[in-house]
Amino acid sequence: MQAVTQQALEDRRLVGAVVLVARDGELIHRQALGWADREAARAMSVDALFRLASASKPIVSAAALVLVAQGRLGLDDNLDAWLPEFRPRLADGRAARITLRQLLSHGAGLGYRFLEEGADGPYARAGVSDGMDASGIDLEENLRRIASVPLLYEPGTAWCYSLATDVLGALIERVHGTPLGVAVRQLVTGPLGMQDSDFVARDVQRLASAYVNDGPQPRRLAEGERVTPFEGAVGIVYSPGRILDPLAFPSGGAGMAGTAEDFLRLLEALRQDRGALLPSELVAEMARDQTGGLELPNAPGFGFGLGFSVLRDPRLAGSPESPGTWRWGGAYGHSWFVDRALGLSVVAFTNTLYEGMSGRFVNDLRDAVYGALAEG
């Protein structure tokens, strides 16, 4: 595993990384390699803070499910009772019913601005923020803009990665009666001891600088730079400085910062399923494919649960992971997975997009983990 990470650094595909592997509740691999800030010659450390991007989603999803466990929300509740002002309609003008379950599983009919084909798509025209730019608007205004755009499909009939977790954040605020950061702290990060996970990075000295893959080596990500994750999408507008702005709205889908060790605490609490955070029946719902057999774009063999993808068919996915493995990532350069059948949790946070999220490093590290287990 160390060799795989070192090779990615030597190939100048990554600038820095923290990799943690836990097996049956024991931390068996812990490493920090490369630079947290290359230009300042600041070495990566295991307690480095990262901009989490979509690694925020499982944390915020777990917060919503704690509210379900408390009896304050139901998975199939209509959002209207809590967010009556959020009323997006279908393309033909009909009203649509959206549930909490559909928000958590990305079956609500919403999309992402960065997934639109061009800079003049419906979300772009409405001024929607994907939660990683310096938009200057608040969460309420972003929801208003999202609701002004017709839904992509009837909720519950298709799947599309989306701003649903940002809407979920507004729902959590309304139900809990506090700002999202306070709610997440009281519901999830506080109880689990995730002391460094928040919507603002407060220790700048530990914050890893953000880089984007380029030749001959990754370059520093510029403020306001747009970078596309794949062909056919207009791409994400990044504001690396957003995580330092206490006035930036809390994006449930992309707005948190945290450490790899904090994130592993969440994964292990869910994997071990001992009631530390959620009752077993809700962990089972998180881990169940909610798509009705629909295929995820560019992810053969995977479905989606409540907050992360779920592996349905390892053969189709070309993966050594066990059926039911949980997996997702983050656009700033992160990947993680939980193989409950093997008691395995793996977190790989890097500061290099998109190699650390969807590049060769992700599968190389996965294969190294399973190779090491086979040898052991």
Image (cartoon, rainbow, N blue to C red):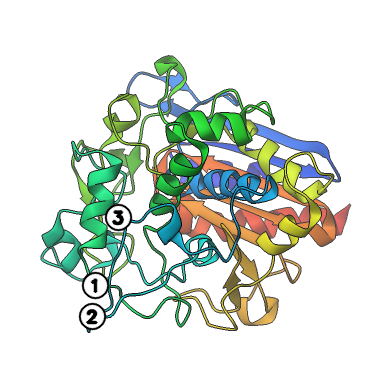
Distance, label 1 to label 3, CA atoms, is 15 Å
**Residue at x 39% of width, y 39% of height:** 255
Query: Which residue was labeled with disc 2?
Result: 91
The image shows residue 31 at horizontal and vertical percentages of 65, 32
The image shows residue 90 at horizontal and vertical percentages of 28, 78
Please determine whether, in this image, residue 312 is positioned above or below residue 128.
Answer: below
Query: Which residue was labeled with disc 3?
Result: 85
Check if mark 1's residue and mark 2's residue have beta carbons within 8 Å. yes
User: Crowding near pointer 1: few (<14 within 10 Å), some, many (20+)?
Assistant: many
Question: In the image, 71: left or right of 304?
Answer: right
Disc 3 is placed on an element classified as loop
Asked if residue 189 shows in the view, the reply is yes
**Residue at x 55% of width, y 79% of height:** 300
Amino acid type for the residue under numbered disc 2 = Ala
Query: Which residue was labeled with disc 1?
Result: 150
Disc 1 is placed on an element classified as loop
Q: If you read the primary sequence from the N terminus, does the residue marked by circle 2 or circle 3 appear first?
A: 3
The image shows residue 65 at horizontal and vertical percentages of 62, 50
Question: In the image, 120: left or right of 368?
Answer: left
Residue ranking furthest to the right: 376
Amino acid type for the residue under numbered disc 1 = Pro
User: Crowding near pointer 3: few (<14 within 10 Å), some, many (20+)?
Assistant: few
**Residue at x 35% of width, y 67% of height:** 110
**Residue 42: image tag:** none
Question: In the image, 293: left or right of 10?
Answer: right
Quarter occupied by residue 77: bottom right
**Residue at x 57% of width, y 66% of height:** 76
Query: Which one is in front, 28 or 337?
Result: 337
Distance, label 2 to label 3, CA atoms, is 18 Å
The image shows residue 68 at horizontal and vertical percentages of 64, 51
